[in-house]
Image: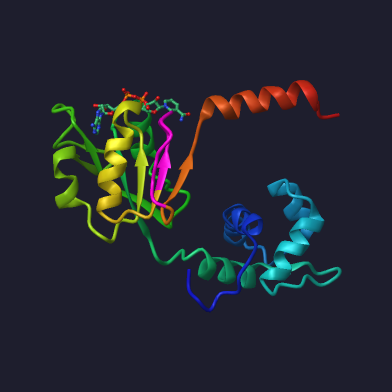
Amino acid sequence: MSNEQPKIPQATAKRLPLYYRFLKNLHASGKQRVSSAELSEAVKVDPATIRRDFSYFGALGKKGYGYNVNYLLSFFRKTLDQDEVTEVALFGVGNLGTAFLNYNFSKNNNTKIVMAFDVDERKVGTEVGGVPVYHLDELEDRLHEGIPVAILTVPAHVAQWITDRLVQRGIKGILNFTPARLNVPKHIRVHHIDLAVELQSLVYFLKNYPLE
Ligand SMILES: NC(=O)c1ccc[n+]([C@@H]2O[C@H](COP(=O)([O-])OP(=O)(O)OC[C@H]3O[C@@H](n4cnc5c(N)ncnc54)[C@H](O)[C@@H]3O)[C@@H](O)[C@H]2O)c1
């Protein structure tokens, strides 16, 4: 993100990709403006929050007019660095890893998995979803400074070992799908994703906070 951008709260920043995707579709269908009520319906965020979020972007909706789609899109593009692709490396081309490589975040065009690593000789040297799979032994040679993010879809028992090597190589962020809790220096950001926890949480909310 460029330094000229105003600082926006983290909660707002998290909603940006949601807004961005919806506005891109609106733009593609030829719409010039959108109301906070329409946006709210589409992205499931309440209109008051949308108005507050958008005020950080310098977009003040006009009564009876709504927001200018082009203005918002160009703001989001700059803020999300859509023009600058962040390259990502993936570790572990198994069930989960293969699915990610085939998907390759095509809807979210500012990130791209550019290489993958595995130790299985049947996978090394192949391409999955157009992404080359290298042997883990090649990590230090292949992983260069231009790749700040890694996705871990390896067995849990090798996760910390690979993480230590990634840290040595200057990685900045790790998306961890393994159940292992990773130890990293303070300046490295780890996001842990656990589908079981997400599912449990959904079931809990269904039971305790039924909608309508
Ligand atoms: N977070 C979640 O919600 C969630 C859901 C399912 C699975 N998982 C976890 O994700 C991970 C992957 O699951 P999966 O079902 O794809 O497993 P998998 O066994 O299908 O795939 C693991 C892959 O890692 C490779 N591998 C093994 N050791 C390696 C190493 N040292 N370096 C690089 N690659 C190595 C294997 O060859 C294999 O291709 C596991 O840790 C699993 O517990 C997480």
* On screen, residue 200 above or below 75: above
Residue 33 falls in which quadrant of the image? bottom right
Please name the residue shown 51% across and 31% down the image.
Answer: 194
At 57% across and 27% down in the image, what residue appears?
197
In the rendered structure, which segment of residues is drawn in magenta?
A: 174-185
Image vertical order of residue 194 relative to residue 48, above or below? above
204 on left or right of 152: right
The picture places residue 3, in percent across and down from the top left corner, at 50, 76
**18 or 26, which is in the foreground?**
18
Q: Measuring 47% from the left and 66% from the top, which residue is drawn there? A: 81
Q: Nearer the viewer, residue 130 or 174?
A: 174
Q: Quadrant of ligand 1?
A: top left
Expressed as whole percent of the image width and height from the top left, the position of residue 7 reads 60, 70
Q: Indicate yes or no whether the magenta region holds residue 28.
A: no
Residue lying farthest bottom?
4
Residue 200 % position (x, y): 62, 23
